[in-house]
Amino acid sequence: MFDTMTMTKIVGAGCGSLLVFMLGGWAADALYSTGGGHGGGEQSYVIDTGAEEAGAEVAEGPSFDELYAAADAASGEKVFAKCKACHKVDGSDGTGPHLNGVVDRQKAVVAGFGYSDALMAMSADAWTPANLDGFLTNPKRYMPGTKMSFAGLPKPTDRADLIAWLATQN
C-alpha cells in the first residue's frame, strides 16, 4: 500500500509547504513592517480620531464611595473566584498573601510572605477601600514593580462588591 517512495513524497510535500509558508511570512514582514527602514521606527503621521475629546465628554458613573455603599458582598464572593488561584481567606498564604482582614490593614504586613519592593515601599499606607479599588483596577499602574500579574477588574461594581466581601473576612 505505502512504500518508502510514497512516504518520502508525503514528507517532502509537508516540508515544502512549511518552507513556502515561512517564506511568505518573511516576505509579508518585509513588505508591511513599520519598524526599521528610512523612518527609523518613528510614526510618520498621526490620524486624529477625536478619541481624546470623546473620552472627556463621556459622563462618569457613580463614584467609588457610592458604589461601595451599595455594594453586595454576596456578589463579591462570586468575584473572588477570580482571585482564588493565588489568594486564600483561610489564614494561609498561597502564591499571594492571605486576604483575611485585608480591608483597612497596613500594606505588606503578613508575616512570612515575600512582598515586592514596590509594595514594601508603600508599607506605611493601609489597604483602605479606595486604595484597594485603585489597586484592583490595574495593579501594575497603581504599583509599578508589583509581583502581582493579575490584569485587574475592569468593572467598578465588581471591585466594590469584592471589597465589601473582603471586609467581612476577618
Image (cartoon, helix red, strand yellow):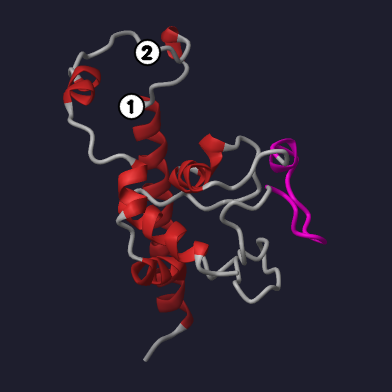
Q: Quadrant location of residue 121?
A: top right
Quadrant of the image occupied by residue 82: bottom left
Q: Can residue 165 be seen in this view?
A: yes
| Residue 164 part of the magenta-drawn span | no
The residue at the point 38 percent across, 22 percent down is 34
Residue 133 is left or right of residue 24, and the answer is right
In x, y percent, where is residue 7? Answer: 44, 77
Span colored in magenta: 107-122
Judged by depth in the image, the label closer to the viewer, 2 or 1, is 2
Mark 2 vs mark 1: which is more N-terminal? 1
Relative height, residue 153 to residue 125 (above, below)? below
The quadrant where residue 64 appears: top left
Q: Which residue lies furthest to the bottom in this view?
A: 1
How far across and down, in percent of the image, does residue 116 sit?
Answer: 73, 45
* Residue 119 magenta: yes
Q: Residue 109 carries which label?
A: none
Whether residue 130 sits left or right of residue 109 in the image: it is: left
Element under disc 2: loop
* Residue position for label 1: 32
The numbered dot on residue 43 is 2
